[in-house]
Amino acid sequence: MRLAFEWAWAWLLLPLPLLAYRFLAPLRRGAGQALRVPDRDRFSRADPIGESSRRFGPDWLIAAFMWLCLLFAAARPLLLDTGLTAPATGRDLMLAVDLSGSMEVRDARLAGRPESRLNAIKSVAGDFIERRVGDRVGLILFGGQAYLQAPLSFDRATVRAFLDESSVGLAGRQTALGDAIALAVKRMSDEGPAPDHRVLVLLTDGAATAGVLTPLKAAQLACETGLRIYTIGIGSSRSSQSGISSELDEETLVAIADITGGRYFRAAAVGRLEEIYAELDLLEPAELEELALRSGRPAHVPALFLALALGLVLAWRARRS
């Protein structure tokens, strides 16, 4: 714990009362009528101590201390907690989540109950995001088009909230796999630390059926910018429910991971998803120093109350004299 001043320049006003006394007091003393006396020697023998004590007595000390309290408050003092640090891995981690129509197929199980593929991702990926302490995390949602839902940020709670609020069909019913990768490349290429620590986790249950760029072309762009892609295929290779079908293009997902130096994971069940995220947790962190955090608490209020109390004491003494 240490004390710091946000407006330290306020202490430059410290000599202001002395300057005012030096230059304004003579003006006040010169005003009015002067008293002429025939014998100045008698006045010179008068006790000067009483005069000096009247000038620089208790009232002056109280006023000076009150002025110091006011300057202390004006300088905006802060009590800083210097012992707080946060780990910094230096990794930028972007999640790209498929919201195409097939993600509502209910072939996943959570707590023994059937759930849609998207809800399974929300449950497991949400916990994964919470564990990424020290990483900047972002979120891309894609269907027929790709959207940046949350930019890279240390605010993992907000990223998780955006993921929880997503729904199937929000970005269209098709799968623009290549455009999702291209958007991640665009958003991550000009920011963050060294390229070796940029990671995209791509979660999808189907093949590319929409978009401008092909997945492999987008993967090549990612490789050129140093973006490593970990692809996760969700659900069975072929499934059909209520007219909704999806075909997982594992060959393309493997190629995307190979081109960028990542890995492909097959998640046929929620339990496998949890294992995959546990493996991703073990990615080698960057060797960076910890982030020093400054938590400041204002400390000007006691000084203001003390200055007010001293002002009341001065007023009380002035009424008594």
Image (tube, rainbow, N blue to C red):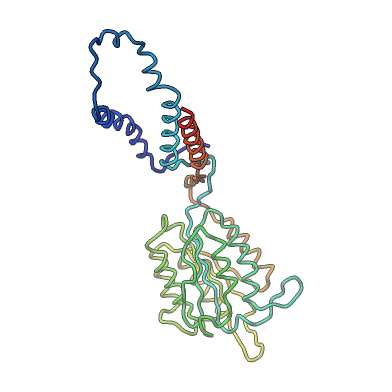
Indicate whether 51 appears above or below 129. above
Q: Which residue occupies the foreground of this view, 101 or 270?
A: 101
183 displayed left or right of 134: left
Indicate whether 74 appears above or below 143. above
Q: Quadrant of residue 114?
A: bottom right
Q: Quadrant of residue 204?
A: bottom right
Q: Quadrant of residue 166?
A: bottom right
Q: Residue at x 48, y 56 (%)?
A: 91
239 displayed left or right of 20: right
Coordinates of residue 217 in the picture (x, y in percent) = 41, 75
Residue that protrudes farthest toward the bottom in the picture: 243
Q: Residue at x 42, y 33 (%)?
A: 68
Indicate whether 299 appears above or below 245. above
Q: Residue at x 65, y 82 (%)?
A: 105
Coordinates of residue 169 in the picture (x, y in percent) = 55, 83
| Image mark count | 0
279 displayed left or right of 139: right
Coordinates of residue 109 in the picture (x, y in percent) = 72, 74
Indicate whether 240 appears above or below 228. below
Coordinates of residue 5 in the picture (x, y in percent) = 42, 40
